Image (spheres, rainbow, N blue to C red):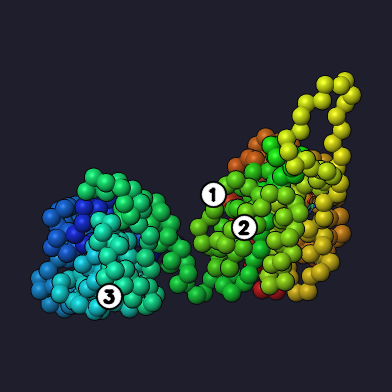
Amino acid sequence: MLKDKNIALYVTGGIAVYKVVDLMRGFIKQGANVRVAMTESATQFVSPLTFQILSTHEVHIDTFDERNPEIVAHVNISDWADVSVVAPATANSIAKIAHGIGDNFVTSALLATRTPIFIVPAMNTDMYENPATQANIETLKSRNVQFVEPDIGFLAEGYEGKGRYPENERIIEELNNFILSKTVDLPLRNRKILVSAGGTIERIDPVRYITNDSSGKMGHAVAEAAYKSGADVTLVTASKLPTPSGINTIRVDSANDMYDEINQHFIDMDVLIMAAAVSDYRVANAADSKMKKDDSSEPVTIELTENPDILKTMGSKKKDQFLIGFAAETDNLEEYAKKKLKEKNLNMIVANEVGQSDRGFNADENQVIIFTDDGERIEVPLTTKSEVANILVNKLIEELNK
Ligand code: CTP
């Protein structure tokens, strides 16, 4: 999202200024153009020359230091920017922004801007928790200014508390999501998409379970690709992978739990993509306490009972929803996939071969064939799961626009 974006970076005076040098480099690495303005106090921590050399632009500090007679610098930077980032933001600067005070270059430029504003507060805990600061933050939030939650951790003052400057990686991720949320012309904007992921877990007793080799990587990649195309995504996942940011994520274990969640949300959805490896069976009488070893020589039998077929059930209920299934096969890939497409009343199916270590379950790459209900066949050669997800989402966009 940051590629070719113009970012006005406003640096105010806190100890975290030195970390913002790297934040700016992170923006530039993602393809953004960055221009920097600093408050006088920020220049006490890091020299403006550092920001100038790394951004390859002049750094603004003094509102009255107007070098180019053709422009007014603080208005020019505001007009140029697509987004304004304040990092680190001190309690003092937050107060000024909240109250419309423009008494230096940074606050004047922020008064003059029409761009979305993204603020990274970093300060002492007591300053952060002060009711005045909290009220100023609330005022700005009510005007759609976006705040990054500070970390709790070891502060410059030598004790633990909330107010710490967060990891740059998190800031960049949240800025990407913020820009995404402000971009209206995305192909899946206003589409609600439900995605399932991971291998379900079927309990034998409180400490043992039956599952499969699915990692959830494919489903999570699909959810992220749909989100980046502007969709409102709900992910129902049995995977242990981290929660993707910006995506409403619901954690489940068993096929029955997954069924309940999907069944509850399905009615409001435009699209369902079932990438989960749902266990076909569950343990008939799962024990409530740990099963003890049986000393007799008789074999121990675990009785299984059938789980609901989630996709098939949704296929039988669907009205206008677009349904995509996955078919994990070790043999007769095309034949079985096409059969599932028909039997489960799907619009599209992604057939992937499993049982090979370099693709499919648990691998980072996948090789698939996509079949549509009107007979189209698209071969996707071995590539990363995120690329497979992009291709699938692009195909979905094409089908929805037909
Ligand atoms: N699926 C489902 N509920 C189940 C089993 C599968 O919703 N109880 C979904 C999967 O998420 C996938 C599709 O159905 O999108 C096909 O799953 P797969 O495991 O390949 O096939 P099955 O229908 O289970 O058939 P089989 O195991 O006999 O191949």
Residue 242's label in the rendered image is 1
Is 288 on the left-hand or right-hand side of 340?
A: left
* Image quarter of the N terminus: bottom left
The spot of residue 391 in percent (x, y) is 63, 57
Label 3, ligand 1: CB separation under 8 Å: no
> Disc 1, disc 3: CB below 8 Å?
no
Spatial CA distance of label 1 from label 3 is 35 Å
Amino acid type at circle 2 is Ile
Spatial CA distance of label 1 from label 2 is 12 Å
- Please tell me whether mark 3 sits on a helix, a strand or a loop: helix
- Please tell me whether mark 1 sits on a helix, a strand or a loop: loop
The spot of residue 315 in percent (x, y) is 81, 65
> Disc 3, disc 2: CB below 8 Å?
no
Which quadrant of the figure has residue 214? top right
Q: Give me the residue at 68% from left, 72% from top.
A: 268
* Image quarter of the C terminus: bottom right
Residue 10's label in the rendered image is none
The spot of residue 360 in percent (x, y) is 68, 43
Which residue has dot 2 on it? 250
Q: Which of label 1 and label 2 is nearer to you?
A: 2
The spot of residue 291 in percent (x, y) is 76, 33
Residue 98's label in the rendered image is 3
Which quadrant of the figure has residue 249? bottom right
Q: Is residue 292 above or below residue 250?
A: above
